[in-house]
Amino acid sequence: MQSTQNHSQSYKINSQRVVSETIANETIVINLETGTYYSLNESGSFIWGNMEESKESPTKESSINLGHIMHICSLRYGVSEKEIEMAVRSFIDNLLAEKLIVPVDAEIVAPLDTKPSTQDVEVTQVSQNHPIFTPPTIEIYRDMQEMLLADPIHDVDETGWPKLK
């Protein structure tokens, strides 16, 4: 997949279509429209978590740009932005393809031109003991789509059990 992203392009979680939960450095994301669920590895969870924080923080924009994502990853993992750029871009492309995130129109949200200081990343993440960077990955599971799309309130059989579509 050829990436057309630039560093100032901003993204946000497609919160009308997805829900997520992070447990022990792994994030599970469910697309409520398709019933597909996803597993994000540790570095993918780190990126997703920062996108969630930008959505929930009243003092920040509701989106995060690619340059900011690469910078906070370089701080956390102690590697250059150049070393992680292709992996981060590929991950963002995959999130876009699955409609888990959406690009934000530059006219609506001004791009974040400033890079975060090390204070924007948790103190434990900027120590000399950086976690090892592994490319962020997304695993896709379509095996439970019927169950996840079932409406247990309205789509029930005569005995009260949910009917699968």
Image (spheres, rainbow, N blue to C red):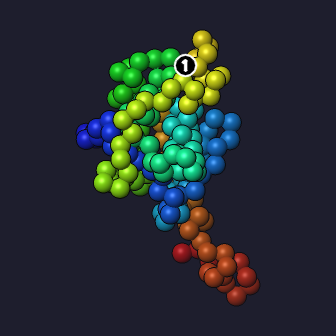
| Residue nearest the observer in this picture, 2 or 162 | 2
Instruction: Please name the residue shown 68% across and 36% down the image.
Output: 24
Residue at position x 47%, y 56% in the image: 14
What amino acid is found at the position of numbered circle 1 in the picture?
Ile
**x and y percentages locating residue 51 in the rendered image:** 51, 44
At mark 1, the secondary structure is loop
Residue reaching furthest right?
159
Quadrant of res 42: top right
The residue at the far bottom in this view is 158
Task: Decide: is 35 above or below 83.
Answer: below
Q: Is residue 116 visible?
A: yes
Residue 82, image x, y percentages: 35, 21
Task: Answer with the quarter of the image where residue 4 lies.
Answer: top left
Residue 135 visible in image: no
Q: Position of residue 35 (x, y in %)?
A: 52, 62
Around disc 1, counting alpha carbons within 10 Å, would you say few (fewer than 14), some (14 to 19), or many (20 or more)? few
| Left or right position of 148 against 12 | right
Quadrant in the picture for the C terminus: bottom right
Q: From the image, tell me which residue sits under label 1.
A: 132
Image: 78 above or below 99: above
Give the quarter of the figure containing the N terminus. top left
Q: Could you tell me which residue is drawn at 63 percent across and 35 percent down?
A: 25
1 or 146, which lies in front? 1
Q: Position of residue 105 (x, y in %)?
A: 32, 54
Marker count (numbered) = 1
Extreme residue toward the front, this view: 59
The residue at the point 54 percent across, 24 percent down is 118
* Residue 5 as seen in the image, left or right of residue 72: left
